[in-house]
Amino acid sequence: MEIPNYFQEQWQKFSKKKILTKTDFQEQEAMLNEYEMTNLNDQEKQEFENLDGGEDQLELQDQQFDQENGEQNKNQSQNSNQNQQEVNQKSNRIKMQKKVQSLTNHYVLYQIIIWDESNQEQKKEIFNYLQQQVDNGEPIYGWLGLCYLFGCGTEQDFELALQLFEEGCKKNEGISLYGMGWCYGNGIGVQQSDSFRIRFYKLAADQNVRGALTDLGVCYDDGIGVKKHPVRAFEYYSKAAEQGCRVALNRLGVLYFNGEGCEKNVQLAFENYERAGELGYKYSMWNLGLNFEEGNFVQQDFQKAKYWYQKAAAKGIEEAQERLNNWDKICEKAQKRKKQEQKLIKKQQDRKLNQYTKKDGCIIF
């Protein structure tokens, strides 16, 4: 279910406003109702129109809003900091509602469900929304299955995850096919089978599911369930990287650096590492720190090295934290090494000059 551009633009207008009024919230409510009505069939519309108490409920919400925010509006100028904080919270709720409604934005769902990059409130909101959509007949069993598989917004339940994947597979749903492949690959609820893993990944990859594209690349890269095939790994990584998959970007960088499955290109290797790091992939952050510290691919830059080490350490990379703990010593050693290199260069230059020998008082070149 994709939110039309018109509604997205309206949400952006609300999120940019510094002060949200009661009228704003009424407009948001009306806009959501309009959007929901456009996605209902005729029978559902009739049922919706026959509901009683809708206006009364809205009026009750308006009164509650007035009670909670009346005093705040009167003292708005005196409590600007508090107002701004509450406005930010409301803006964040609006943004989250946009995220959970935009099921085409797979990057957001991958971040929250698989990569565990959100707080518990966001996870719960995502789960509740997905559960509601499945209950309403939306064919998104795969995403809900991933929630149960990874315990996102709910308790981990492998059996229920597998049931949802199976239901989605009957409808040829790409994410469900990917989830089923993941279960077979890791022996979750079924007997471990690399053969079935590959089979389901390929079916999902045919639908351009980037998780399947990435994992297929890993299988061909590492020889899991298939013979190692760097060229195919490169092809699958490239397709996933086009969708912004940071794991694929990092792996693509490795292939470029080693010249496996493609021509060696250290510049493209670094660019892929950098893109993956900017997207939050911790191993790329670590690699970027090392590259800037040692001057690989790029000019040596200790400030940028420290920046990426801090990012990696915040993601749990212990080696990066160790680097930061000994940062002063590392910089000191680097300075000594630089001086030694300068001395070596000076000696080489002097040696080259000494090649010009004197004979009979004449300089022989």
Image: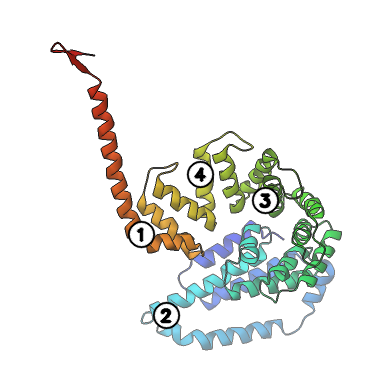
Q: Amino acid at mark 2?
A: Gln
Q: Which residue is mark 3?
A: 214
Closer to us: mark 3 or mark 1? Answer: 1
Residue 20 appears in view: no
Per the rendering, the mark at residue 271 is 4
Identified by mark 1, the residue type is Trp
Residue tagged 1: 327
> Viewer-proximal residue, 251 or 206?
251
SS label for mark 1: helix
For the residue pair 362 and 238, the one nearer the viewer reads as 362
Residue 76 percent coordinates (x, y): 40, 80
The answer to which of marks 3 and 1 sits earlier in the sequence is 3
Q: Are marks 2 and 3 in contact (CB under 8 Å)?
A: no
The residue lying at 51 percent from left, 76 percent from top is 21
Residue type at mark 4 is Glu
Spot occupied by residue 303 in the image (x, y as percentages of width and height): 36, 54
The earlier-in-sequence mark between 1 and 4 is 4
List the residue tagged with mark 2.
82
Residue 62 vertical position relative to residue 279 in the rendered view, above or below: below
Instruction: Measure the alpha-carbon separation of dots 1 and 2.
Output: 39 Å
Residue at 57% over, 65% down: 11
| Residue farthest toward the front in the current orientation of the protein | 360
Image quadrant occupied by the C terminus? top left
Question: What is the CA distance from the residue labelled 3 to the residue labelled 4?
Answer: 18 Å
What is the C-alpha distance between the residues marked 2 and 3? 45 Å
Q: Secondary structure at mark 3?
A: helix
- Label 1, residues with CA under 10 Å away: few <14, some 14-19, many ≥20: some
